[in-house]
Image (spheres, helix red, strand yellow):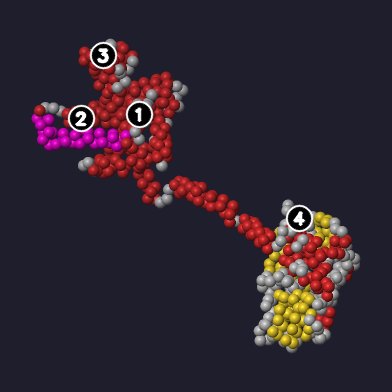
């Protein structure tokens, strides 16, 4: 059984490296009980636990994709550690957002909350602009900036001739995204 | 580090992605504090990258939710056929396959047959003396009667089917040559009428043998000397007389105690030569009515032989060669004979006491051609202890020791 698990874990990492996204659901189902029991045992609800597990899986995915994941622990242990840290951060974040603190922030003239809202709004605009891009462009940008894969991996996944082609394509897609974003901003301002 | 270098080598992006070394990052931060255009570019790049990352994160979370939902739906729908197939494969591998292997190796019908055959061989070996195997080969002899075929053959063929022979196809004939003298001697034992092997197939032979009947007939007693010599003989007593193509077999009386009389088994006890001698000395021996011309089935022709002994002393001899099967039933004579036939009884001869109930005493002995039975009730002269004297119609008086079922009658007067 241990041997079987070991091979399964190795296989999971290989599948992540080869951009097999079906691993996501499998990881969730496999470690659901472990993460959920921890989060729910530490003041979180089911939605929180689900969110934490999803984020932990994403971190694992990014680490493995970027090649920065070292196989020193089982994926389950790694996911639990990530979920714990994230949940602690979330708890701290929530504790900051108590009514008194929020009121004091506004009174002091600090705009941390507003800044956050503004940055979220801007991020939302970028998301929408990204959706407007052609699918290969969007995929390339996500592979490079979100999954932080190297150009060799991207050229292999997207079936480009080589890494240089992927690099030039990435530059073009970034410019296209800027253009779409600028266009949408102008449109929004003109609408107002 | 200047603006041109930063633009050329995508330093903004590398800084945001954390791909700069500590020194490079320090130089970049120092430049950024003093360069407003680079600050603007950095903010723009940061916004774009954070937006892409957030989009990627949302998309991945959505992907996870979709897959989990699909998995739950699959669970609700019922069986995971993939798992079922895996489980079936596991069951096949760990349970059924070893079971089948075990079955074919240990409990398959063929295996049981082979085991049963081995057991029978063992039983036969233990029951019958060492040369039984050889005697068994020579036990069955077939003779073609003159009345059926018009002449006696000194050499006949026994059909034998090769293992690879096709079903229903006439079997390959193998000729077993045999000396006429041997045929004459062996003809005293057992005689079966078989159809002409040159013309008939093995199946026909088998059917012919199955149809043959067993019956007893009158015989002639032998001399006292021969009867005396027969005392020491524990050999077989099968006596035959043939006629009109029908097989006639009469069984002799075994002198062995605590064992059902079985002429066939008795025949298997001794070597063929010894049996020939025993037969010649036997009081129940009769010259064959037919002449020589016996056929001997070789051992190769009968790979399997089975004996079935019934309580009433009937013996089934089952011979198997490939798919061919021959059954021969030997039925002991039940005929009682007239006491007038006892006129030429020897001075001593083996007898068996068969009844001691209120009906009286009955004595059996082997006449040359039949099993004889005599009610001793009216013939008893005296009886003292375990000895009894009886008088036969020819006025001769014999003595019998009653302590055992099988004893001998000794002429007293």
Mark 1 or 3: the one toward you? 1
Taking depth in this image into account, of B224 and A46 the one nearest to the observer is B224
Q: In this view, does B373 lie to the left or right of A69?
A: right
Looking at the rendered structure, the secondary structure element under dot 3 is helix
The earlier-in-sequence mark between 4 and 3 is 3
Mark 3 or 2: the one toward you? 3
Residue at mark 1? A69
Same chain under badges 1 and 2? The reply is: yes
Residue B34 image point, x, y percent: 21, 13
Q: Disc 2 is attached to a residue of which chain? A: A
CA gap, disc 4 and disc 1: 77 Å
Farthest residue, direction bottom: B378
Residue B213 image point, x, y percent: 77, 72
Name the quarter where the N terminus of chain A is drawn: top left
Residue drawn at the location 75% of the way across and 75% of the way down = B350
CA gap, disc 3 and disc 2: 28 Å
CA gap, disc 4 and disc 3: 104 Å
Q: In this view, does A135 lie to the left or right of A106?
A: right
Quarter of the figure with residue B103: bottom right
Can residue B7 be seen in this snapshot?
A: yes
| Span colored in magenta | A78-107
Instruction: Name above or below for residue B128 compared with residue A107.
Output: below
Quarter of the figure with residue A148: top left
Same chain under badges 1 and 3? The reply is: no
Residue drawn at the location 69% of the way across and 79% of the way down = B402
Q: Disc 1 is attached to a residue of which chain? A: A
Looking at the rendered structure, the secondary structure element under dot 2 is helix
Residue B359 image point, x, y percent: 68, 86
Residue at mark 4? B300
CA gap, disc 1 and disc 2: 30 Å
CA gap, disc 1 and disc 3: 29 Å
Q: Disc 4 is attached to a residue of which chain? A: B
């Amino acid at each position: 059984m241990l041997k079987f698990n070991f091979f399964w874990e190795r296989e999971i990492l290989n599948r992540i490296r080869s951009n097999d996204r079906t691993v996501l659901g499998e990881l969730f189902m496999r470690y659901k009980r472990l993460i959920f029991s921890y989060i729910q045992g530490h003041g979180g609800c089911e939605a929180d636990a689900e969110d934490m597990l999803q984020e932990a899986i994403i971190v694992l995915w990014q680490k493995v994709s970027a090649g920065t994941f070292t196989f020193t622990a089982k994926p389950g242990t790694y996911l639990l550690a990530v979920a714990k840290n994230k949940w602690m951060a979330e708890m701290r974040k929530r504790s900051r957002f108590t009514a008194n603190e929020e009121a004091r922030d506004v009174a002091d003239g600090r705009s941390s909350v507003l800044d956050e809202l503004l940055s979220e709004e801007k991020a939302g605009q970028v998301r929408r602009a990204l959706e407007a891009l052609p699918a290969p462009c969007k995929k390339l940008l996500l592979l490079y900036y979100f999954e932080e894969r190297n150009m060799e991996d991207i050229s292999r996944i997207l079936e480009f001739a080589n890494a240089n082609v992927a690099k030039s394509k990435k530059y073009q897609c970034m410019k296209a995204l800027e253009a779409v974003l600028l266009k949408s901003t102008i449109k929004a301002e003109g609408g107002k | 580090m200047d603006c041109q270098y930063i633009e050329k080598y995508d330093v903004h992006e590398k800084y945001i992605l954390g791909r700069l070394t500590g020194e490079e990052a320090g130089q970049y931060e120092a430049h950024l504090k003093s360069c407003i255009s680079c600050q603007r570019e950095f903010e723009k790049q940061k916004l774009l990258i954070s937006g892409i990352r957030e989009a990627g994160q949302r998309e991945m979370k959505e992907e996870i939710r979709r897959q989990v939902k699909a998995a739950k739906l699959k669970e609700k729908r019922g069986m995971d056929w993939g798992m079922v197939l895996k489980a079936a494969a596991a069951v096949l591998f760990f349970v059924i396959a070893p079971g089948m292997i075990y079955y074919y190796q240990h409990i398959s019908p063929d295996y049981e047959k082979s085991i049963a055959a081995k057991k029978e061989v063992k039983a036969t070996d233990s029951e019958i003396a060492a040369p039984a195997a050889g005697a068994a080969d020579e036990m069955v002899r077939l003779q073609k009667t003159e009345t059926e075929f018009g002449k006696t053959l000194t050499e006949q063929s026994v059909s034998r089917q090769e293992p690879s022979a096709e079903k229903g196809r006439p079997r390959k004939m193998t000729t077993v040559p045999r000396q006429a003298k041997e045929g004459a001697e062996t003809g005293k034992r057992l005689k079966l009428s078989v159809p002409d092997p040159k013309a008939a197939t093995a199946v026909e032979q088998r059917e012919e043998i199955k149809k043959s009947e067993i019956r007893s007939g009158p015989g002639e007693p032998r001399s006292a000397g021969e009867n005396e010599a027969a005392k020491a003989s524990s050999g077989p007593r099968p006596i035959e007389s043939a006629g009109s193509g029908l097989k006639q077999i009469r069984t002799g009386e075994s002198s062995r105690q605590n064992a059902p009389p079985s002429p066939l088994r008795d025949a298997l006890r001794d070597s063929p030569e010894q049996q020939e001698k025993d037969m010649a000395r036997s009081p129940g021996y009769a010259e064959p009515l037919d002449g020589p011309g016996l056929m001997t089935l070789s051992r190769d022709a009968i790979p399997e032989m089975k004996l079935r002994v019934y309580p009433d002393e009937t013996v089934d001899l089952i011979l198997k060669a490939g798919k061919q099967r021959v059954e021969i039933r030997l039925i002991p004579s039940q005929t009682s004979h007239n006491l007038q036939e006892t006129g030429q009884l020897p001075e001593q001869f083996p007898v068996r006491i068969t009844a001691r109930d209120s009906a009286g005493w009955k004595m059996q002995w082997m006449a040359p051609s039949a099993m004889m039975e005599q009610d001793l009730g009216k013939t008893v002269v005296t009886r003292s202890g375990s000895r009894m004297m009886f008088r036969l119609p020819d006025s001769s008086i014999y003595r019998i020791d009653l302590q055992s079922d099988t004893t001998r009658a000794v002429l007293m007067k």
